[in-house]
Image (cartoon, rainbow, N blue to C red):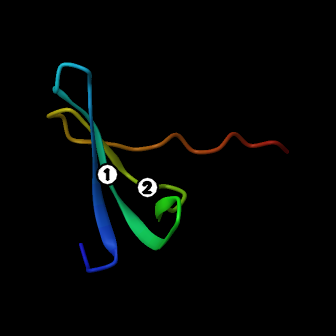
Amino acid sequence: MDAGEVLVSVRKYDSRPHWHHSMARLGEDGHGVRLGAAVGTVYGKGARGPVYPAAPACTS
């Protein structure tokens, strides 16, 4: 990760790890910090390895 990246770690109500991934810090305003993730961002789930997003369905 570089200085513009943030590690997002979401936990369940009982504090067990749920999803985690990195996002780009886009800026900050009066509402808080803005983050963004590119299409195809790889997520992790709990203690398991990477979870790759499904490819978009072909519409043609």
Between residue 9 and residue 57, name the one nearer to us: 9
Counting other residues with Cα less than 10 Å from the Cα at mark 2, is it few (<14), some (14-19), or many (20 or more)? few
Report how far apart the C-alphas of labels 2 and 1 lie in the structure.
8 Å
- Secondary structure beneath dot 2 equals loop
In the image, what residue occupies the spot 14% across and 34% down? Answer: 47
Residue 41 left/right relative to 30: left
Pick out the residue farthest to the top. 14
Answer with the quarter of the image where residue 12 lies: top left
Residue 22 left/right relative to 34: left
The picture places residue 56, in percent across and down from the top left corner, at 64, 44
- Secondary structure beneath dot 1 equals strand
Q: Tell me which numbered mark, 2 or 1, is placed earlier along the sequence.
A: 1
Is residue 38 in view from this perspective?
yes
Counting other residues with Cα less than 10 Å from the Cα at mark 1, is it few (<14), some (14-19), or many (20 or more)? some
Between residue 23 and residue 27, name the one nearer to us: 27
Quadrant of the image containing the N terminus: bottom left
Nearer the observer: mark 2 or 1; the answer is 1
Q: Amino acid at mark 2?
A: Thr
- Whether residues under marks 2 and 1 lie with C-beta atoms below 8 angstroms apart, the answer is yes
Quadrant of the image containing the C terminus: top right
In the image, what residue occupies the spot 25% across and 21% down? Answer: 13
In the image, what residue occupies the spot 47% across and 43% down? Answer: 53
In the image, what residue occupies the spot 41% across and 69% down? Answer: 24
Pick out the residue farthest to the bottom. 3
Pick out the residue farthest to the right. 60
Name above or below for residue 28 compared with residue 21.
below
Q: Which mark is residue 41?
A: 2
Name the residue beneath numbered marker 1. 21
The picture places residue 9, in percent across and down from the top left corner, at 26, 45
The picture places residue 11, in percent across and down from the top left corner, at 25, 32
